[in-house]
Amino acid sequence: MKQDFITAIDLGSSGARAVAVEFRSPEERPTVIAAAEAPLAGVRRGTVVNAEEAAEGLRAVLREIRIQSGAPVSEVICSLSGTDLVSRSSRGVVVVGRGDGEITSDDVDRVLTAASAVSIPPNKEIIEIISRDFIVDDQKGIGDPLGMKGVRLEVDAAIIDVSTQSVRAVEEALAAAEAEATETVAAPLAAAEAVLSGQQKELGVVLIDIGAGTTSLVVYEEGKFVHAAVLPVGAAHITNDLAIGLRTDIKVAEKVKLRYGTALVETVDRREQCDLSSIDPREEGLVWRYHIAEIISARMEEIFTLVQKELDKIGKAELLPAGAVLVGGGAKLPHIVPLAKARLKLPVRIASPAGFGGISDRTDDPRYAVVLGLVRHALREDSPTRSSVGRGAVGSVFGRVGKAGRRVRSLLDRFLP
């Protein structure tokens, strides 16, 4: 039987993660047949600033993916993030093309393209157009207008744009690693694809991805995209704080965070001490574990305060019944859920990608939300409510996935949230 693959890469501030996903039959789950991670230099706050340095990490993960999968990988779907990622509201309107007034996919493409004709800074590039509602003549609240009849088609949409320079830098880094991005996807949207259910999106939910250099968030309500943002602080800032507060090396500080870290100072015995020499023989002295917790808690409170301010800007603070869903490496910090609940005043849970077979011990992890969300995004890219702008991406991805991608889409709906 013919085998089909999708390879996805998530470019994070501290590392790159890649997976290869195989589709065998409609009766089987999509299978992760390869997964790899590597440190990534040349990335600052989620944005590639040095393509040559970033290429080294990309070569490492792609080499491992090629070895594990036994396949020559040259085309990938890739995430884009960074603090310059912005979501904006827009509207588009067109006259229905057919004489009998029936709305076709061409009309939908044209109205989404019209919605992209907005004024953005000259150094920015639109990477996503997402419909919230279609309007046919005076009929509002339409999710999918295909096959309806009317004269005028409008769309209430959101666009997501990023720095053109960051897009070019990603392309250059991939090219240096002998790969090409057939599509680039906003990282917050990819993470949401991996872990959020339709019910959560309907009720109202915020997904919070706590990465190394940034924390990204995306909000859904009534089944629709509402807002996305990337905040300039992440789990690596905790490590930096510990290095300063404990007067120790950054590598030792990272190990202290992983071994002794907690988001809640109340969970720590004030009398407990930690011996730094147990982490690194070159380090001397004892530190109070309570002091470690104070440093970590202060930074985590700042992160959730910034998230709360972002929700307040769009009028959704404390008003999302499905609460907050945490992913990313920072979500693995002990006792992060009660701290998030207290600061956001919402239900909170940690999520990992679901619905994939294969190397589950490696991919059933909050850190893999973005990269596996990229795969799910690729399989749904022919949705009538999405459009890629100026990149020719949809044809490239589905040209490779072909019939397998179309048949597996219904499979994913069964297995994924």
Image: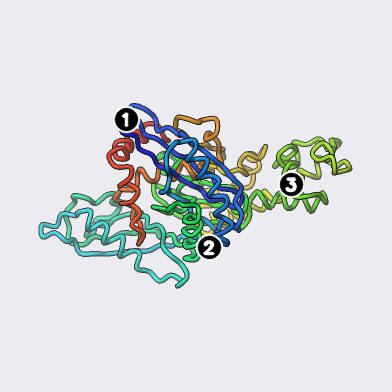
Which of the two residues, 150 or 254, is positioned nearer the viewer here? Answer: 254
* Disc 2 + disc 3, Cβ < 8 Å: no
Depth check, front residue: 106 or 402: 402
Q: Quadrant of residue 46?
A: bottom right
Q: Nearer the viewer, residue 140 or 110?
A: 110
Which residue position is annotated with label 2? 84
Dot placed on the residue nearer the N-terminal end, 2 or 3: 2
Residue 256 in the image: x percent, y percent? Answer: 76, 41
The quadrant of the image that shows the C terminus is top left
Nearer to us: label 2 or label 3: 3
Q: Within the image, what quadrant is residue 327 found in?
A: top right
Residue at left offset 40%, top offset 53%: 183
14 relative position to 278: left or right: left
- Residue type, mark 3 in image: Lys
Give the residue at the far left of this rendering: 100
Image quadrant where one finds the N terminus: top left
> Is any atom of residue 134 visible in this view?
yes
For label 2, count other residues whose C-alpha is less than 10 Å away and answer few (under 14), some (14-19) or many (20+). some
The type of residue carrying mark 1 is Pro
> Distance between the Cα atoms at labels 3 and 1?
46 Å
- Which type of secondary structure does the marked residue at label 1 adopt? loop
Residue on which the image places disc 3: 251
